[in-house]
Image: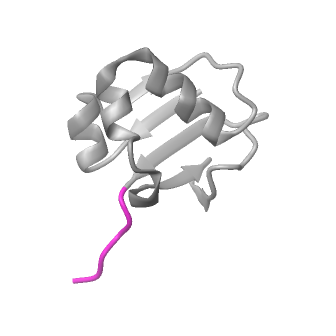
Amino acid sequence: MDVLYFAWVRERIGIPKEKVETGAATVMQLVEELKAREERYEVAFSDLSALRVAVDQELTDFDAPLEGVREVAFFPPMTGG
C-alpha cells in the first residue's frame, strides 16, 4: 500500500510517500510497524493525538481496518485561516 506523509510528519520522516508491505490489520498496527523501523518514524509518531489519518482518502481513526486498503495518509490536524 502507499503511505503518505504531510506537513511536519513528512519533514520528520524525510519522505513524502512510500510503498509499504505490511501484515498489519489496523492503522495502529501499521504505526507500530513503522515506529519499529527507525528512530525518525518513532519521533514522527510519538504523539498520535497530534496526528490525523485518512484511509483511501477518507478521514478515519487509528483503529480502522486495513484490509483491501490502497492508501494511508498521516497529517496534522488542519487549522483554519
Q: The N terminus appears in which quarter of the rendering?
A: top right
Q: Nearer the viewer, residue 31 or 15?
A: 31
Look at 45% across and 27% down and name the residue there.
35
Q: Is residue 77 magenta?
A: yes
Say if 62 sits above or below 35 in the image.
below
Using residue 48 as the reference point, say whether residue 58 is left or right of it: right
Hey, which quadrant is residue 13 in on the image?
A: top left
Look at 63% across and 41% down and name the residue there.
27
| Residue 6 image position (x, y, % from top left) | 32, 47
Q: Nearer the viewer, residue 22 or 70?
A: 22
Hey, which quadrant is residue 18 in on the image?
A: top left
Q: Is residue 34 magenta?
A: no
Say if 49 sits above or below 34 in the image.
below
Question: Which residue is most to the bottom?
Answer: 81
| Residue 70 image position (x, y, % from top left) | 64, 34
Using residue 21 as the reference point, say whether residue 73 is left or right of it: left
Using residue 51 as the reference point, say whether residue 6 is left or right of it: left
| Residue 19 image position (x, y, % from top left) | 49, 21
Tell me how many marks there are.
Answer: 0
Look at 71% across and 38% down and name the residue there.
26
| Residue 11 image position (x, y, % from top left) | 20, 38
Say if 46 sits above or below 37 in the image.
below
Using residue 31 as the reference point, say whether residue 64 is left or right of it: right
Look at 52% across and 53% down and name the residue there.
53
Q: The C terminus appears in which quarter of the rendering?
A: bottom left
For the stretch drawn in magenta, what is the main secondary structure? Answer: loop
Say if 23 sits above or below 16 in the image.
above
Which residues, given as a range, are shown in magenta?
76-81
